[in-house]
Image: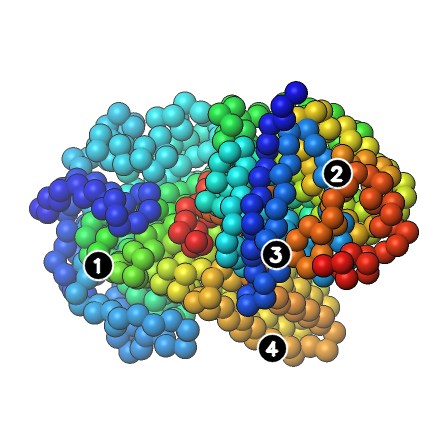
Amino acid sequence: MTKTPLLEIEDLCARVGEKEIIKNFNLTVNEGEVHAIMGPNGAGKSTLSYVLTGKPGYEVTSGKIRFKGKDLLAMAPEERAREGIFLCMQYPVEIPGVPTTTFLKHAVNAVRKHRGEPELDTLNFVKMVREDGKALGIDNEMIKRPVNVGFSGGEKKRLETLQMSILKPDFSILDEADSGLDIDALKVVADGVNALRDGHRSMLVITHYQRLLNYIVPDFVHVFADGHIVRSGDKNLALELEEKGYAEFVKEK
Amino acid sequence: MVKEKPEIADESGDKYKYGFVTDIAADTAPKGLNEDIIRLISHKKGEPEWLLEWRLKAFAFWQTMTEPSWAKLSYEKIDYQDLYYYSAPKQKAAPKSLDEVDAELLKTYEKLGIPLKEQEALAGVVAVDAVFDSVSVATTYRAKLAEMGIIFCSISEAVKEHPDLVRKYLGSVVPYTDNFFACLNSAVFTDGSFVYIPKGVRCPMELSTYFRINARNTGQFERTLIVAEDDSYVSYLEGCTAPQRDENQLHAAIVEIVVLKNAEVKYSTVQNWYPGDKDGKGGVYNFVTKRAACRGENSKISWTQVETGSAVTWKYPSCVLQGDNSVGEFYSVAITNNRQQADTGTKMIHIGKNTTSKIISKGISAGFSNQTYRGLVRVAPNARGARNYSQCDSLLIGENCGSHTVPYIENRNKTAVIEHEATTSKISDEQMFYCLQRGIGEEEAVSLIVNGFCKEVMQHLPMEFAIEAAKLINVSLEGSVG
């Protein structure tokens, strides 16, 4: 069975300001695969997620990124999102005064419009949010509140997961999805994420603890240090890392 | 007789949706201001002698006054002798129904989104007293309101049909000596609305009026008077749109509101005068005096305004809280973009005991615009137990705009409690990126965030107005990012 590549990163170099953070980074993620990227703090894991999503201030100096065969770097951040790249943020930002449900509806319809699908009317939108929210323990009251305002860490992560669920992205990046979560909240989020694994959607799970990978089990694990992948393996590599720490890999280079 | 060709807004120009000019023969008095012009206005309108005398007194006083310069506004000096003070659409006689109204005029209203014919069909929703240029052309629902004793007509008609009421209250809240622009208005006002709600009557519908500046170089001097007798209630809406112009247009309106014992008046405005182009060329100069007097116990006035238009705005809707326990509220959203300038706020004058006031002001500045919140809270020596809460928030979009907050507090009573909060914020890069990452485009994101910022004020607008206002906010901020 031949695999269809979804995301292809070739010799990527990127910097923030004057500082070179991503150096000759290579990775191919095929349809349906879940890749984990592990690495010490400050290795540039979050930078990678921002480069992929086109956050202003993150400058690609060389290399190529193809997404579904298209040149990703030529797309504006919102186009990348509409094409199906979703970043589950480590620290989702608050937007005062904007009801979560209003925000979600704008997002869903922006993506649907791009796919040539009709906009969802309020009735169908509410139905979808209610169904997808149920498994995540998100009720009507929660989404009436302004986006992330006064949300606990767990609520924020659950809302991110809900958005991933209703936007149906082809490629999701989970940036430290477990930070700030207790074990129960972690399970809820992991279940939500696992429910989206359908053999077609792909994910990049960024974390520096192995814990999360007990719940979201990856097909591949990569160790990220000094701006690129220094070693790749299967889920057992994560366990090895947990035992030995990163120091060895950082040296290895 | 002046005939004008319809102008079509230059596509490359800007986004002012209502930038068109109606082709109607205008009946215009010569340029300039003198006693003869005032006599002509008064004569054209068939006014009684007392009103002419009042106008002339105002004019004499105005000549002793100087234009105020304390506001943080800069604009070219206005030559008051280079303006027209009277113009009226030419019509044979007052129309008895909408069928008799100039078809061109009706088309204009359709472009503005006010299909009067539909309005009439949608009986009971909104009564529209449409003011075109200076003379009222159509008044709907009057009969229905008249059954309840409610008077809703143009002020010119009110002068003829209810002279005692007009004479009793005109200038009683804003005397002609009040300020330069109010004085000018008193001398030359051409038309406006008059509302009278009798004792114990709750007006069953929102009353609304749409103003529109049309004839070239015509100063606009509307005058609106609202009187709410004891135990009455009315909600009044005012909405403005103006056609695109190269010359600056002067607008100096007055709104006077008298609120008696246990009565409540809600006054909502969506103001969308032409703001000028990207470089600040053209646009309306808006110098408005709006004031309400709460004269009885428990009377209440609530101002809600959404200001998106005008090149220059000078406006401070105020509440004079005379009656004990009376309440004044001011909810404001002001948006300035490009080269717009706004100096706006409110005055809360506490005179009666246990009077309360609340100020919620949201200012959004974008482009190269400049905005000042200027507010006064004054507590008189006898206003025991007075309370005020003020909250002034500013949101800046971009690097080149300015926002200023100038709160004045004058407290003469030790028992008063006055609170003031102010914040200034920017749309953060993180907020923008969060929206973009979810597929929401830049302009849509700004509009979402701004609407969220204004929500506290917008929710005080009547439903249909809130929708219109939200659309206006989006139009006003187009091009402010990216």
Left/right of residue A245 with respect to residue B91 in the rendered view: right
Q: Secondary structure at mark 3?
A: strand
Neighbour tally class for label 3: few under 14, some 14-19, many 20 plus, Cα within 10 Å = many
Residue at the (52%, 50%) spot, across then down:
A63
- What's the amino acid at mark 3? Ile
For the question of whether residue B288 can be seen, the reply is: no
- What's the amino acid at mark 4? Glu
Colouring mode (rainbow / by chain / secondary structure / one colour): rainbow
State whether discs 3 and 1 lie on one chain: no
Percent x, y for residue A52?
A: 58, 46
Marks 2 and 4 close (CB-CB < 8 Å): no
Neighbour tally class for label 2: few under 14, some 14-19, many 20 plus, Cα within 10 Å = some
Q: Which residue in the structure is indicated by mark 1? A: B247
Along the line of sight, which residue is nearer the eye, A219 or B293?
A: A219
Q: Secondary structure at mark 2?
A: strand
Q: Chain of mark 1?
A: B
In front: label 2 or label 4? 2
In front: label 4 or label 1? 1
Q: Which residue in the structure is indicated by mark 4? A: B410
Residue at the (78%, 56%) spot, across then down:
A249
Q: Which residue in the structure is indicated by mark 3? A: A22
Along the line of sight, which residue is nearer the eye, B278 or A40?
A: A40
Q: Which residue in the structure is indicated by mark 2? A: A220
Mark 4 or mark 1: name the one nearer the start of the chain: 1
Q: Work out how far the residue at label 4 is from the one at label 1, CA to CA, in angstroms.
A: 40 Å
Percent x, y for residue B276?
A: 30, 57
